Amino acid sequence: MIPSKYQRVVFAFFMSSLMSFLMSGVITFINLGFIDGFVSLWLEAYWKAFIVAFPIIFVVAPFVHKLTNMVIKKN
C-alpha cells in the first residue's frame, strides 16, 4: 500500500486519469462519431488530456476541498 503522505498525489492521479479517460472518449465521439480508428484516436486524446489534467488537479484540489467545506452545511 502507498503511505498516506502521498494521498494528494494519488488522488490527483486517479481523478485526472478517470476524468481524462471519460471526457476524451465523450468528446472524441461527439466530434467524430464512432469511426474506424476511434479507439486509437480516443487513447491519443486521453494521454494528452491526462498530461494537462494531472498537474491542474494536483494544484486545484486543495482549493476545491476548501470551497466544498465552505458550502456544505455542517450538523
Image (spheres, helix red, strand yellow):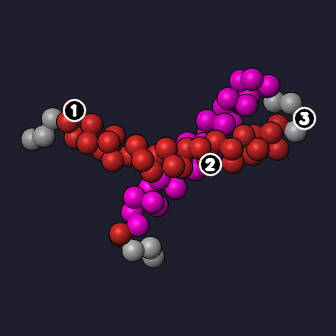
Q: Would you say 53 lies left or right of 6 here?
A: right
Q: Please state if 68 lies on the left or on the right of 24 as rendered.
A: left
SS for dot 3: loop
Q: Residue at x 33, y 40 (%)?
A: 64
Q: Residues within 10 Å of mark 1 (few under 14, many from 20)?
A: few
Residue located 80% across and 39% down the image: 41
Dominant secondary-structure state across the stretch colored magenta: helix
* Quadrant (top left, top right, bottom left, bottom right) of the C terminus: top left
Is 24 included in the stretch rendered in magenta? Answer: yes
**Label 2: few (<14), some (14–19) or many (≥20) C-alpha neighbours in 10 Å:** few
Residue 49 image offset from top left, x and y in percent? 64, 42
Name the residue beneath numbered marker 2.
51
Q: Earlier in the sequence, mark 2 or mark 1?
A: 2
Residue 37 magenta-highlighted: no
Residue at image position (72%, 40%) is 45
Depth check, front residue: 74 or 13: 13
Per the image, label 1 sits on a secondary structure element best described as: helix
**Quadrant of the rendered image containing residue 26:** top right
Amino acid type, callout 1: Val
Number of the front mark, 1 or 3: 1
Specify start and end residues of the magenta stretch as a single range: 6-33
Q: Is residue 48 left or right of residue 5?
A: right
Residue at the spot x=67%, y=29% of the render?
27
The residue singled out by tag 1 in the image is 71
Disc 2 marks a residue whose amino acid type is: Ile
